[in-house]
Image (cartoon, rainbow, N blue to C red):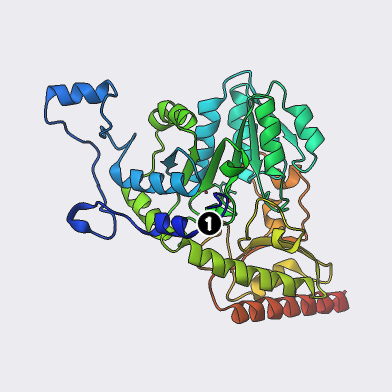
């Protein structure tokens, strides 16, 4: 079967397990800090890495391993490792593969906290990060020689630009640079970057993979050699391993991943299309509305819209009922995030300011609620917010 597509085998990997005690259909939660050894000889074998058993849950736990194994297989990777947030996955990759004096090439409009990690902590440790327009292939290729890591998101945050992953992967490989893609938006249901030559894929599992907005988690998948590097450095020393209970929650979320993603895709596309026809909406930034991106086999439901000057954005936000105001995405509930607020966010370098995100942008996550009800909520909020502008205009 075509490795790049999410197929019946993947659905089985996501939803079925075998070999649990008592033939339990769901995995047990091994809520334990350490694992004991029956003898001196057994303990010695384990410490010499001649046996695969667990020692301590900061480094490995069987409940977490169930999730890691599923992610590795879904992303067509040899191995995976799970961390307690998506940011721990990102910092784990960075600090396991990059050292002082090295340079990272990073796509513009990267996730805001990744940007802060690069511009604060990486900078303090003398790691340089050079930002490039990921759609400008010549610019990326020119930046690669001598770099250590190529850090990508496709689509990117806020602007939802898609990248030519096979070409970028080949260019990175040619320059001896490790390539990594944040695949949180597409999930392995809609994009499998490793099948296009990318070296590492990472996720904020807090989003669609878990899918229920009830935990934060991260995963990284790739070759055994690269995951071994993470397991030798990030896992024991940064100490951000995922906990057994949170791994169990994400594993539970994976069972419905493909059904949820199909519903998100359908409602997301329909609402995005209706928004393009709304007079108060200047543009809708949704990869599914543009010319097909060859590596995406579908689209999730996070996108942005540019509202015209006729809309009072704070009034629009306050008029929403079903959509809640909030960060994050990937759960049941629909959410709105106005760029106007992000542009004023304090606490370090601000990627929205530095990359010039428009204050007229509002990001939407289309959740699993009734699609007609979601559309009605957006339409009435746009109506109210344009009426507000007109009234205010009249008062002046
Ligand atoms: C949320 C997010 C992250 C960070 O993940 P956390 O689990 O919140 O640490 C990284 N990348 C993208 C694209 C995200 O949306």
Which residue sits at x=19%, y=52%?
Answer: 21
Determine whether 347 is above or below 190 in the image.
above
Q: Is residue 46 left or right of residue 234?
A: left
The residue pinned by badge 1 equals 6
Q: Position of residue 229 (x, y in %)?
A: 46, 27
Q: Nearer the viewer, residue 334 or 277?
A: 277
Residue 337 in sight here: no
Q: Position of residue 109 (x, y in %)?
A: 71, 45
**302 or 26: nearer the viewer:** 26
Task: Tell me: 202 left or right of 348.
Answer: left
* Residue at image location 27% in from the left, 60% down from the top: 25
Depicted 281 relative to depicted 63: above or below:
below
**Residue beneath the point at 38% across and 29% down:** 236
Q: Quadrant of residue 111?
A: top right
Which residue is outermost to the front?
A: 1
Kindly give the residue lying farthest to the top in the view shown: 101
Q: Residue at x 67, y 30 (%)?
A: 172
Residue 199 appears in view? yes
């Amino acid at each position: 079967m075509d490795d790049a597509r999410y197929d019946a085998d993947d659905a089985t990997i996501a939803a079925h397990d075998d070999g649990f005690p008592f033939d339990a259909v769901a995995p047990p939660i091994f809520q334990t800090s350490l694992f004991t050894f029956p003898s001196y000889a057994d303990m010695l074998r384990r410490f010499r890495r001649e046996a695969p058993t667990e020692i301590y849950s900061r480094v490995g736990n069987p409940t977490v391993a169930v999730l890691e194994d599923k992610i590795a297989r879904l992303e067509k990777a040899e191995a995976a490792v799970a961390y307690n947030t998506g940011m721990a996955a990102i910092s784990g990759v960075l600090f396991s593969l990059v050292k002082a004096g090295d340079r990272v090439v990073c796509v513009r409009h990267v996730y805001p906290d990744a940007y802060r990690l690069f511009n604060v902590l990486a900078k303090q440790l003398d790691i340089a990060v050079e930002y490039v327009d990921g759609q400008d292939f010549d610019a990326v290729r020119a930046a690669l020689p001598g770099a250590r890591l190529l850090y990508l998101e496709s689509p990117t945050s806020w602007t939802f630009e898609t990248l030519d992953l096979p070409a970028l992967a080949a260019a990175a490989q040619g320059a001896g640079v490790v390539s990594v893609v944040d695949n949180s938006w597409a999930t392995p249901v809609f994009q499998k970057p490793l099948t296009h030559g990318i070296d590492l894929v990472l996720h904020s599992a807090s989003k669609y993979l878990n899918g229920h907005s009830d935990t934060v988690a991260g995963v990284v998948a790739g070759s055994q050699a690269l995951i071994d590097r993470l397991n030798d450095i990030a896992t024991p020393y940064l100490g951000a391993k995922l906990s057994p209970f949170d791994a169990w929650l994400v594993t539970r979320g994976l069972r419905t991943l493909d059904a949820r993603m199909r519903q998100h895709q359908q409602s997301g596309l329909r609402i995005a299309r209706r928004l393009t026809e709304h007079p108060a909406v200047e543009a809708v930034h949704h990869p599914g509305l543009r010319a097909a991106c060859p590596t995406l086999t579908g689209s999730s439901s996070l996108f942005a819209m540019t509202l015209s000057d006729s809309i009072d954005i704070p009034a629009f936000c306050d008029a929403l009922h079903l959509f809640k105001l909030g960060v994050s995405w990937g759960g049941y509930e629909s959410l709105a995030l106005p760029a106007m607020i992000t542009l004023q966010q304090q606490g370090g370098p601000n990627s929205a300011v530095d990359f010039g995100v428009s204050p007229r942008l509002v990001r939407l996550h289309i959740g699993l609620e009734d699609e007609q009800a979601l559309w009605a909520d957006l339409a009435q909020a746009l109506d109210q917010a344009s009426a507000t502008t007109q009234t205010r205009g009249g008062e002046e």
